[in-house]
Amino acid sequence: MMMMMMMKNFGMTLQALTLLLVIALLWNHAAASNAEAQDCCLSTSDYEIPRRIVVEYQKQTVESGCKIPATVFVTKKGRRLCAPVPEKSEWVAKLIKKLKKNVRRRRQNGKRQ
């Protein structure tokens, strides 16, 4: 009789441990998925963005987990505007060139002071 009670308790303990292990694995998987989430452009616009409102740009790649490659321009108000990659759009390439030139100019002016 005592042996049956011990076996029953062992079975319940094993079930509880299995349940805890499954919960821990699912929790870990959910945390890993959230860590990889990022804000990606789902499409791009050929509408030319005025230079005066752009403060920086970033490249979006498929390798970084996004579905499409894109150029993300960040405006003075913090908005993120999705544009084609520079290889596919001349105005994007020109805007990036201007932004890089301004960064170089600011760095040079900063060194002189």
Image (spheres, rainbow, N blue to C red):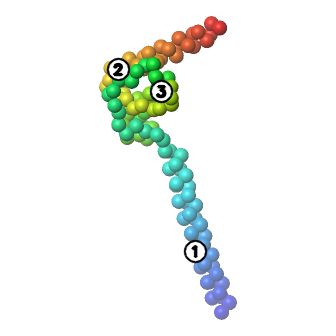
Q: Is residue 88 above or below residue 23?
A: above
Mark closer to the chain start, 1 or 3: 1
Mark closer to the chain start, 1 or 2: 1
- Residue type at the position of mark 2: Trp
Q: Are marks 1 and 3 in contact (CB under 8 Å)?
A: no
Of the two numbered discs 1 and 3 in the rendering, the one whose residue sits closer to the viewer: 3
- Mark number displayed over residue 91: 2
* Quadrant in which the C terminus is drawn: top right
- The quarter of the displayed image where residue 82 is located: top left
Of the two numbered discs 3 and 2 in the rendering, the one whose residue sits closer to the viewer: 3
x then y, percent, for residue 20: 59, 66
Q: Secondary structure at mark 1?
A: helix
x then y, percent, for residue 8: 61, 84
- Residue type at the position of mark 1: Gln
x then y, percent, for residue 1: 65, 92
Residue at the disc numbered 1: 15
3D distance between C-alphas at marks 3 and 2: 16 Å
Residue at the disc numbered 3: 75
| Residue found farthest to the top | 112
- Mark number displayed over residue 42: none
Q: Secondary structure at mark 3?
A: strand
Residue at the (58%, 9%) spot, across then down: 109
Q: Is residue 87 visible?
A: no
**Left or right: 73 as drawn, with respect to 28:** left
